[in-house]
């Protein structure tokens, strides 16, 4: 492990961000991180409980909001889509935060619930029934269905027709469980019930889900001398009211309390976590004293109940009729450790079996198999989630050791050390975010090989496997890019394309835009492939235009009878005039650049051998030409040297010849000399337009290639040197002082736009926040990217003075 970047608060004389107690953080599947601090005002001598949300690609662009919680925030929890956040406090208030206008840096509190005066100790969204298991041992299979399988998993609660019902469950310190359900009409149904008849103090709790739709709650009063209790919770809706039923499950005592040598050594249980939200059979426990800790992993198993011989003779037990009971059995335990300050569990739903303690050599270092333990000496250990054996280690700046010195011989330093008070692993377990005792956010890389020597093919295989998982699930893959070196990019893109082409046609169509966006983000990391970034973004734009314009084609019996064909075409195509013009301009640009096809640095180069994209352009040219017969004003405008020249016919003829050369992916031929000669004449016949390519993104991922630590400050954009190869595109993208353009509406905004704009957190695409047009046809186009950019990235609001 190594530090990628750290981000800290600016020191101010009268108000300071200080870490809250307890400090909590959460990491979403969209790579948004939420964490808490307390804003201390020295004049009023009070604390404001803040929630901060950052995108990992732009950590300095933090959205800080006064949570409105009157007491310290105890829990943060993202939903399965990564678009909503729950926060709970020590006064029993739970708030649900949602994006404002689908912006990652603008949030508002929409709904909530309350258990007045009862601190919340555990919080979770109800399960939606979606679980996709990874089979690491089948990472070399060709079919995605073998690598990732849909697990039969029932939602916690369903609406009519089987649709999962949204809501959350919380456990309070007095032993109450509260469930809030979000009805489709916006109402909130809330119910509260005691976990058991004899209520007792709950210092620690966690929530997990079973495949049958039930909920399991684990609780502890904080003392290792007391049992860890487990309860089954069933939620239902009866007569428009939420109903909660609870049942006691087998409990356990930690092994360290039953060992005579350690009976009183670890008096307090400090951490209680299920290994995963959907893995209620395995739990992690940590007991501590002032200086040391011990960690144990337990598993719930079904075991046969032995029957006395007397009863055996009366009623013999045959086969499966033997009575079974549930028992907790310890899987593994650590030796004495330094005091644990935080625990982070993996989110990858890897299919685990009893044999996983002895996994094969090629998969035992897979990142999703490890969990993270942070210690008070500033170090972080990655240990196997079942065997608890060491997999990787990181030492903080306060206790650095020489590279050649063995980890076990590292000398300790005296005095207070900075340590993580809250940690979260990313959804692929390749990155770790920690907030330390000074309120500073640190981002750590976790090597796919877990610090062990693996050959390049194995490392690529791990990265490829996780990229495929993100492609199938729709999760953001920023944390995977942290480990991609320039020398890997070409290989990864080719192998990703090969695996994609092995899937069936239906799955390819579903994943068609996602793989293009993934290729674009990979190619941005290497000087030899960065020229393709603009091409991939242009292809995403082309796919969106093609789908939108084709959706306007409908059978004649669905047409409005009171309008002529020409009027209908006018209603459809005039709002899309800028998009039609882009299609025409791009075709002309491609054909004019064909004589220079030997220069791969020039944007548009990959289109010249992409038969599928050229076929899409041909289809659009035909559709536009037919509409132009009814309304000539729908046609794209060209500046020609001759008034009698039919520009569209000329371009279509040349485009068809080029398409014939590469329509079969496995049999691409070189364009003949006649076609190249005709394309050479285009600049003398038509004015070649300038294409507005997307700018090189201002994110941090390309600045982390040299593995050097980057120091950042919240609220202050860094003055980092850009990508070493970005200068290649200075001739193709607009300079900061030049007029800006709305990349999706193809509208010019001027050098200093007065309209509020938003930009994509991944590709840097810029568009206006509010639509300038109220036409229905325009809304149909804008609905394609209102929630996410065409590349799948989230939107963030930009200041009016952006450059």
Image (spheres, grey):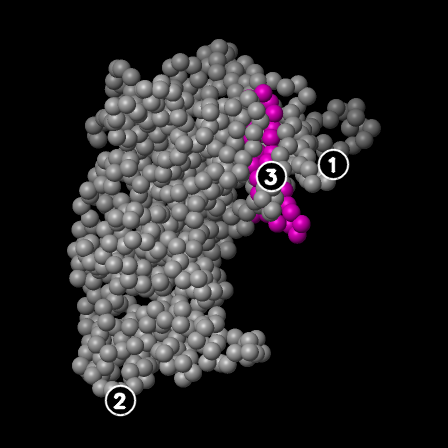
> What secondary structure is marked by label 2?
loop
Distance from disc 1 to disc 2, alpha carbons, whole Å, reads 91 Å
In this orientation, does residue 348 appear? no
Residue at horizontal 21%, vertical 66%? Answer: 602
Cα distance between the residues tagged 3 and 1: 45 Å
Q: Is residue 505 above or below residue 56?
A: below
Residue 508 sits above or below residue 589 on the image: above
Q: Earlier in the sequence, mark 3 or mark 2?
A: 3
Q: Which label lies toward us, 1 or 2?
A: 2
* Boundaries of the magenta span: 151-180
Indicate which disc residue 301 carries: none
The disc at residue 188 is: 3
Q: Indicate yes or no whether the magenta region holds residue 165.
A: yes
On residue 321, which mark appears?
A: 1
Q: Tell me which residue sits at (17%, 58%) in the image.
A: 730
Q: Return the residue at label 2.
A: 644
First in sequence: mark 1 or mark 2?
Answer: 1
Label 3 crowd bin: few (<14), some (14–19), many (20+), radius 10 Å: some
Q: Secondary structure beneath disc 1? A: helix
Q: Is residue 600 within the magenta segment? A: no
The spot of residue 44 in percent (x, y) is: 35, 20
Residue at 49% across, 81% down: 565
């Amino acid at each position: 492990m190594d530090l990628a970047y750290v981000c800290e608060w600016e020191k101010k004389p009268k108000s300071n961000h200080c870490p809250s107690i307890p400090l909590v953080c959460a990491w979403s599947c969209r790579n948004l991180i939420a964490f808490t601090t307390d804003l201390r005002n020295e004049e009023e001598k009070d604390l404001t409980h803040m929630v901060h949300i950052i995108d990992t690609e732009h950590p300095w662009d933090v959205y800080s909001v006064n949570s409105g919680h009157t007491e310290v925030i105890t829990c943060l929890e993202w939903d399965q889509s990564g678009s909503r956040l729950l926060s709970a406090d020590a006064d029993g208030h739970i708030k649900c935060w949602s994006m404002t206008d689908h912006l990652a840096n603008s949030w508002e509190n929409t709904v909530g619930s309350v258990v007045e005066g009862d601190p919340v100790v555990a919080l979770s969204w109800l399960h939606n029934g979606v679980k996709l298991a990874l089979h690491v041992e089948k990472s070399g299979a060709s079919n995605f269905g073998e690598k990732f399988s849909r697990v039969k998993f029932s939602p916690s609660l369903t609406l009519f027709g089987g649709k999962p019902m949204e809501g959350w469950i919380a456990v309070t310190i007095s032993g109450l469980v509260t469930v809030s359900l979000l009805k489709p009409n916006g109402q909130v149904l809330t119910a509260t019930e005691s976990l058991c008849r004899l209520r007792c103090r709950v210092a620690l709790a966690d929530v997990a889900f079973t495949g049958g739709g039930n909920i399991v709650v684990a609780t502890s009063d904080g003392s290792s001398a007391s049992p860890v209790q487990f309860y089954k919770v069933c939620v239902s809706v009866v007569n428009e009211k939420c109903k909660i039923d609870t049942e006691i499950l087998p409990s356990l005592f930690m092994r360290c309390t039953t060992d005579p040598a350690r009976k009183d050594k670890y008096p307090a249980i400090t951490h209680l976590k299920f290994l995963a939200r959907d893995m209620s059979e395995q739990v992690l426990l940590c007991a501590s004293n002032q200086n040391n800790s011990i960690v144990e992993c337990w598993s719930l198993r079904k075991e046969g109940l032995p029957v006395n011989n007397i009863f055996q003779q009366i009623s013999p037990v045959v086969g499966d009729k033997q009575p079974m009971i549930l028992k907790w059995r310890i899987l593994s335990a650590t030796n004495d450790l330094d005091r644990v300050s935080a625990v982070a569990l993996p989110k990858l739903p890897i299919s685990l079996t009893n044999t996983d303690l002895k996994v094969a050599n090629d998969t035992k270092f897979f990142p999703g198999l490890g969990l993270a333990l942070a210690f008070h000496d500033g170090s972080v250990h990655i240990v196997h989630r079942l065997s608890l054996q060491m997999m990787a280690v990181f030492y903080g700046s306060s206790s650095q050791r020489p590279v050649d010195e063995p980890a076990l011989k590292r000398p300790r330093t005296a005095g207070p050390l900075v340590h993580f008070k809250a940690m979260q692993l990313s959804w692929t377990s390749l990155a770790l975010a920690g907030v330390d005792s000074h309120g500073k956010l640190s981002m750590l890389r976790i090597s796919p090989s877990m610090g062990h020597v693996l050959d390049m093919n194995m490392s690529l295989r791990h990265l490829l496997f996780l990229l495929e998982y993100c492609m199938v699930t729709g999760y953001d893959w920023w944390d995977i890019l942290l480990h991609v070196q320039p020398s890997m990019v070409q290989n990864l893109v080719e192998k990703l394309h090969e695996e994609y082409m092995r899937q069936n046609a239906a799955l390819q169509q579903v994943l068609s835009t996602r793989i293009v966006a993934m290729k674009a983000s990979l190619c941005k990391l290497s000087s030899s492939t960065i020229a393709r970034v603009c091409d991939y973004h242009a292809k995403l734009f082309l796919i969106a235009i093609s789908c939108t314009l084709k959706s306007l084609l409908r059978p004649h019996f669905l047409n409005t009878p009171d309008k002529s064909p020409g009027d209908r075409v006018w209603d459809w195509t005039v709002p899309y005039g800028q998009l039609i013009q882009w299609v025409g301009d791009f075709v002309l640009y491609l054909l004019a650049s064909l004589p220079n096809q030997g220069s791969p640095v020039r944007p548009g180069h990959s289109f010249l051998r992409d038969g599928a994209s050229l076929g899409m352009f041909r289809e659009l040219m035909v559709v536009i030409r037919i509409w132009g017969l009814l309304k000539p004003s729908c046609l794209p405008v060209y500046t020609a040297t001759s008034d009698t020249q039919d520009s569209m016919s000329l371009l279509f003829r040349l485009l068809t010849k080029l398409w014939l050369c590469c329509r079969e992916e496995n049999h691409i031929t070189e364009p003949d000399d006649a076609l190249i000669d005709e394309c050479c004449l285009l600049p003398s016949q038509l004015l070649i337009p300038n294409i507005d390519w997307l700018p090189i993104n201002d994110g941090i991922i390309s600045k982390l290639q040299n593995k050097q630590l980057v120091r950042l400050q919240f609220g202050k954009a860094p003055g980092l040197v850009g990508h070493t190869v970005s200068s290649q595109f200075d001739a193709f993208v607009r300079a900061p002082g030049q007029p800006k353009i709305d990349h999706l509406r193809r509208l010019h905004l001027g050098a200093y736009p007065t309209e509020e704009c938003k930009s994509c957190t991944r590709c840097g695409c810029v568009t206006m926040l509010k639509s300038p047009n109220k036409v229905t046809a325009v809304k149909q186009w804008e609905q394609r990217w209102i929630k996410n950019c065409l590349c799948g990235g989230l939107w963030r609001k930009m200041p009016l003075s952006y450059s």
